[in-house]
């Protein structure tokens, strides 16, 4: 088991990529804090993990609130004695909209979840990891940071910001043996997907349009990202820091 004895926090852990990552980390032996604003969803993921013989706890946390971020990290450390992995995965999408139609509230909401949320996670998790002189801080960015699609400019900018944040934090924490890595998924089959497609639900037209842009000919499953997160969190990735790992079937080529 690649994460045996490790303690991990996964934000946005109630659904999609976060839920798959929490399950995968638990399967690899980590004790996992499943954090989300959706407390019922987080509890559901914890129950699945426990049924499979793993260890997890659900915590209601809004990543845009400093007090929630601080409590989240403190609870993990108090319960399990340390913090080895923080996966800053929670995020919100953007409806395809021309820039002149984007209001300030939309900009603020996307930046709060996708950028401030990651910053606050780092602010509270990294001091613990620096003291321990070990730890891995992962961030879910997006291929939108590298190869945006039209009409998602605020989302793309938010993901670009955290790719740069990962590099800056990697330099800051490398002397302490701590690694920071961003993951850039192409469109992934989660509840967020229809919004990116500008649809209420994914339909054949939307799917065909997106799949046509991916050389490997399919979108991500949440498990594709979870497998990457487990690898990056493990000692197998000991020399990877500051990178943005594209999980995109070739979309960004
Ligand atoms: N689905 C895609 O196509 C795709 C592609 C690239 C990147 N991403 C990124 O992957 C990450 C996970 O998204 P997903 O696709 O699994 O979507 P999802 O909607 O299935 O999951 C997102 C989770 O984040 C939680 N969340 C949202 N705001 C929060 C907040 N303020 N505090 C705590 N939790 C919050 C939601 O409740 C939800 O459980 C996001 O950062 C997203 O931007 C998604």
Image: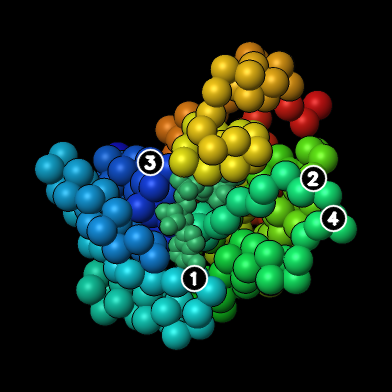
Where is residue 124 shown, x and y percent of the image? 50, 78
Q: Nearer the viewer, mark 3 or mark 4?
A: 4
Rendered residue at 43%/42% (across/down): 16
Rendered residue at 57%/56% (across/down): 92
Residue on which disc 4 sits = 99
Q: Earlier in the sequence, mark 1 or mark 2?
A: 1
User: Quick check: can you spot residue 133?
Assistant: no
- Residue 59 position (above or below residue 49): below
* Structural distance between the alpha carbons of marks 2 and 4: 7 Å
* Structural distance between the alpha carbons of marks 4 and 1: 26 Å
Residue on which disc 2 sits = 151
Does residue 131 appear to the left or right of 160 in the view shown? Answer: left
Q: Earlier in the sequence, mark 1 or mark 3?
A: 3
Pointers 2 and 4 in contact (CB under 8 A)? no
* Structural distance between the alpha carbons of marks 3 and 4: 33 Å
Q: Residues within 10 Å of mark 3 (few under 14, many from 20)?
A: many
Pointers 3 and 2 in contact (CB under 8 A)? no
Q: Nearer the viewer, mark 4 or mark 1?
A: 4
Where is residue 176 shown, x and y percent of the image? 58, 71
- The verdict on label 3 being within 8 Å of ligand 1 is yes
């Amino acid at each position: 088991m690649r994460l045996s004895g490790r303690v991990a926090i996964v934000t946005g852990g109630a659904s999609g990529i976060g839920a798959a990552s929490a399950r995968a980390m638990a399967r690899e032996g980590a004790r996992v804090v499943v954090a989300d604003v959706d407390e019922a969803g987080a509890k559901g993921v914890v129950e699945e993990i426990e049924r499979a013989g793993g260890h997890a706890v659900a915590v209601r946390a809004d990543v845009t609130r400093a007090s929630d971020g601080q409590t989240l990290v403190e609870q993990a450390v108090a319960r399990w004695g340390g913090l080895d992995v923080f996966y800053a995965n929670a995020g919100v999408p953007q409806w395809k909209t021309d820039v002149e139609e984007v209001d300030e509230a939309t900009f603020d909401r996307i930046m709060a979840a996708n950028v401030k949320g990651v910053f606050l996670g780092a602010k509270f998790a990294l001091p613990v990891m620096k003291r321990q002189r070990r730890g891995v801080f992962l961030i879910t960015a997006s291929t939108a940071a590298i190869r945006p699609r039209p009409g998602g400019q605020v989302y793309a900018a938010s993901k670009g910001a955290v790719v740069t944040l990962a590099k800056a934090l990697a330099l800051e924490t490398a002397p302490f043996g701590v690694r920071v890595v961003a993951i850039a998924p192409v469109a992934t089959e989660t509840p967020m997907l229809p919004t990116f497609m500008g649809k209420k639900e994914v339909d054949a037209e939307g799917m065909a349009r997106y799949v046509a842009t991916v050389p490997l000919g399919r979108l991500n499953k949440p498990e594709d990202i979870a497998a990457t997160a487990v690898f990056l969190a493990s000692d197998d990735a000991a020399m990877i820091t500051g990178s943005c790992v594209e999980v995109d079937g070739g979309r960004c080529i």
